Image: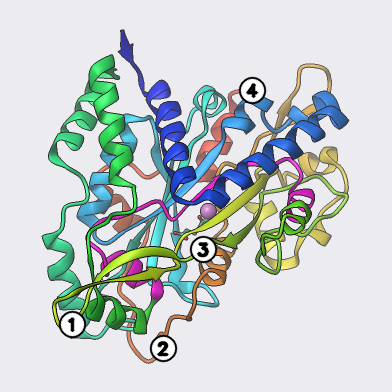
Amino acid sequence: MRVGPTELRARFARSLSDLYGTEVPAYTTLVEVSEEVNAEVLERLGEEAERLGTIDRVTAERHGAIRVGTAEELAQVARVFGACGMHPVGFYDLREATVPIPVVSTAFRPTEVDELAANPFRVFTSVLVADDRRFFDESLTAELGERLAARELFAPELLALADRAEAEGGLAEDDADRFLELATAAFALSPEPIDRAWYDRLEEVSSVAADIGGVTSTHINHLTPRVLDIDELYARMTDRGITMIDAIQGPPRTDRPDVLLRQTSFRALAEPRTFREPDGTLGEGALRVRFGEVEARGVALTPAGRALYDDHGIEAFPATEAELHEADLAYYVPDGAGGLRPIVYEDFLPRSAAGIFASNLDRETAADAGQAAATRDAHWMREALGRPLADPYDLYEEQRASHR
Ligand code: OOG
Ligand code: NI
């Protein structure tokens, strides 16, 4: 029996979840509390609770975040995700945030309605902009270039299996097991010693740059379950003694329909890592770069709705779904019973992403505004990926149009 992309994606999400649970125990608590809250919301609201996705979808739903160093690494990870039916959607420039981060990002996710319903696993993927002079001087750019070119994040065997899966629409059971084993291992925290002097030098400039370029592998930065009541979840995590970041990112709670994405996070504990000291000896140390995050999703906004949200906030929105639909501010389809069914927002918010990055850093990035930015845009991203890059709005439009 062939294991197709949908099944590979579902297994991959589960396997990463098992890995992350062993690496970051607070993640397991977060998943437990999310499931507890979801069960209660379902009990309280019945069918209404499933308007933005069935309980099976929401229970399995995760997003991960990873960070890579170069266009080549990005193209490789795209092949691994491609095998799982996860395609790059959207371009995010985190360098433009209030607290600038020297990366640009996309999200790999399923793009078809049925695929999203079966398992919506998505991975927010950032790539370092190592030649941006506002962050890195010439010598740092050069050394980053050399070190990143010398490392191998994904074994040739993994990439060959990924290519085969994509070309043939799946893998035989044995090959699928091997693919998942290698793919999961590629995102595990590596025991490889970290060059202390190099890591520190990068960290002076940016903790994210150090997390990416200061080590010889990549790892999941966080894995995020979905919850149906994020305010309740926030309160419960706090009751369990886990210190959450100050606020929930994204639209504040209102009694209007839920739109876009609300997220919150907590800092994971420092994790023991091995360092190679400047004198060549190995020593134990700790790094605190990974964390826990949870999210609640609402209806996707149209470009007009998004502009209204960005410029005027959620208070500027009408109070009902019918009005949101009438004014073409959000995407809905007919529910077959004379009402409306929301199209879920499946993407990310750059402002929240930057907030999530920033609240989990010890130190802010020093950007020299007097220097020129390196050019990175959707066109660059498409070229780097070597495959199509979808525009989220096109996908929501298509989904809506298919119901007309
Ligand atoms: C990614 C941060 C962005 C989100 O949910 O907005 C993100 C990272 O920390 O690598 O995951
Ligand atoms: Ni996230």
- Mark 2 and ligand 1: say if the CB distance to the nearest ligand atom is below 8 Å: no
Please give the name of the residue rendered at 49% of the width and 51% of the height, measured from the top-left corner.
24
In the image, which disc is placed on residue 278?
Answer: 1
Q: Mark 2 Cα within 10 Å, few/some/many (few <14, many 20+)?
A: few
Q: Mark 3 Cα within 10 Å, few/some/many (few <14, many 20+)?
A: some
* Kind of residue at disc 1: Pro
Q: Any magenta on residue 244?
A: no
Indicate left or right for 303 with 221 as reference.
Answer: right
Distance (Cα) linking label 4 and label 3? 47 Å
Q: Position of residue 48 (x, y in %)?
A: 82, 29
Q: Position of residue 302 (x, y in %)?
A: 64, 47
| For marks 2 and 4 on the same chain, the one whose residue lies earlier in the sequence | 2
Residue bearing the label numbered 4: 403
Residue bearing the label numbered 3: 269
Which structural element holds mark 2?
Answer: loop
Q: Is residue 87 visible?
A: yes
